[in-house]
Amino acid sequence: MLIGNKSDLESIRAVSNEGGRSLRRLKVCFSMETSALDSTNEKTAFEMVIRDIYSSMSRKHSTLTLTKRKVQRSFFNLWEL
């Protein structure tokens, strides 16, 4: 995820608009611009970051739960031998 702040200051831009669009098109990462000066996309950017973190944590939890179940089943299968 690439979030550029100070979208109102074009002259000191670190990543060009086209660079951000290219990353999105190539599906390398999501990108958006924000501006604290006029509150452009501030709330949206924060919500996107929170959703991304939550989604990532949920996937990790699901993977750990499935792995734990597989290990438990394997252990019980060995125990029955």
Image (cartoon, rainbow, N blue to C red):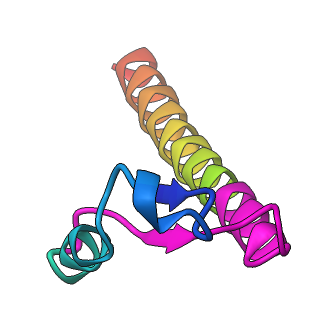
The segment highlighted magenta reads 27-51
Query: Total marks drawn?
Result: 0
Residue 50 lies within the magenta run: yes
Image position of 45 (left or right of 2): right
Q: Nearer the viewer, residue 49 or 81?
A: 49
Q: Is the residue 27 above or below the residue 74 in the image?
A: below
Image position of 26 (left or right of 70): left
Q: Nearer the viewer, residue 1 or 79?
A: 1
Q: Residue at 44% of width from left, 51% of height from top? A: 12
Q: Residue at 84% of width from left, 75% of height from top? A: 38
Q: Residue 32: where, in percent of width, then height?
A: 51, 72
Quadrant position of the N terminus in the picture: bottom left
Image position of 47 (left or right of 6): right
**Is residue 1 something that shows in the picture?**
no
Residue 16 quadrant: bottom left
Q: Residue 44: where, in percent of width, then height?
A: 75, 75
Q: Nearer the viewer, residue 11 or 69?
A: 11
Residue 77 lies within the magenta run: no
Q: Residue 27: where, in percent of width, then height?
A: 23, 73
Residue 65 quadrant: top right
